[in-house]
Amino acid sequence: MAVGSEINPNDAISSAQKVELLFFGQLKERLKCSKLSLEITQPLTISELKLRLVSQYPHWQPWLEERELLAALNQTMSSSDEIVKAGDELAFFPPVTGG
Amino acid sequence: MSIHIQVQTDDFNVGDEHNTLCSNNKSDGAVVTFTGLVREFSSGDNVIALELEHYPGMTEQLLQSIAEQAQTRWQLARICIIHRVGYLALGEQIVFVGVTCRHRQAAFEGAQFIMDYLKNHATFWKKEHFKDSSNWVEFKQSDKKAMGRWQKKP
């Protein structure tokens, strides 16, 4: 999977049933993925969604379970117990280092 | 009262930004600007360039919110924040923060608050390039500590 590619680009499922995932910084490089659409059938917490990702991509486990990993739900910093719904945008990234 | 936020790959001209902060401004007695540059030494090796990426959309919102907080707290009349992304060579400009205020102390503090807050919260990630390798910059605890001084009311 190339950086910048989506997992199922031709998937017929409407975006209403999907969560758009984004990865940044070192995480993006380690996962070799900048974004992907994840199909969900019901709302789930950010930590549940992480577990879904790990079961789907077991080699991502060490990076997704990194203690300092941050999450932003619909571009707002979020804790792992927040609920993700279809149509949401969820980003994972390491601590920021701008300026 | 104005806030200007810009995330861009292009360079900026500090003189132009300073003039914009000063032009037609009869109420403010103080202009404070800060410019961050790509420096040579980091963790021992010679840095030859930096690569900066960000979360488009979220970054601009965060910078806007940082500026609004500073504006309210120090009554800053004009704020300009410019942050570059992409590949930046040694000595190039990375970030610009400029503020205007009636008096200098509030202007100094406001600009410093914006930089501290930006370093701790704005969604940018920096990668250092050396001659034969590259390395993602780790978050610095000293930046977190710098935030502590703003917990108390000025």
Image (cartoon, coloured by chain):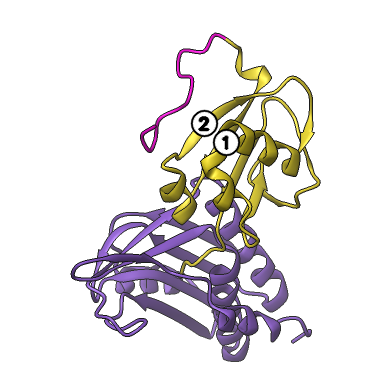
Chain colours: A yellow, B purple
Who's the residue at 38% across and 77% down the image?
B35
Which of the pair B18/A73 is nearer the observer? A73
Whether A3 is among the magenta residues is yes
Indicate left or right for A10 with A20 as reference: left
- Image position, residue B98 (x, y; %): 47, 74
Whether A43 is among the magenta residues is no
Mark sitting on residue A21:
1
Asked whether residue B127 appears in the rendered view, the answer is: yes
Disc 2 on helix, strand or loop?
A: strand
- Image position, residue A92 (x, y; %): 59, 48
Host chain of mark 1: A
- Quarter of the picture holding the C terminus of chain B: bottom right
> Distance from label 2 to label 1 (Cα)?
5 Å
- Image position, residue B140 (x, y; %): 53, 77
Indicate left or right for B94 with B153 as reference: left
Which of the pair A59/A93 is nearer the observer? A59
Disc 1 on helix, strand or loop?
A: strand
What secondary structure characterizes most of the magenta part? loop
Type of amino acid under label 1: Leu
Magenta region, residue range: A1-12
Type of amino acid under label 2: Leu
- Classify 10 Å Cα crowding around label 1: few (below 14), some (14-19), many (20 and above): some
Q: Earlier in the sequence, mark 2 or mark 1?
A: 1
Who's the residue at 53% across and 68% down the image?
B79
- Quarter of the picture holding the N terminus of chain B: bottom right
Indicate left or right for A96 with B13 as reference: right
Mark sitting on residue A36:
2
- Classify 10 Å Cα crowding around label 2: few (below 14), some (14-19), many (20 and above): some
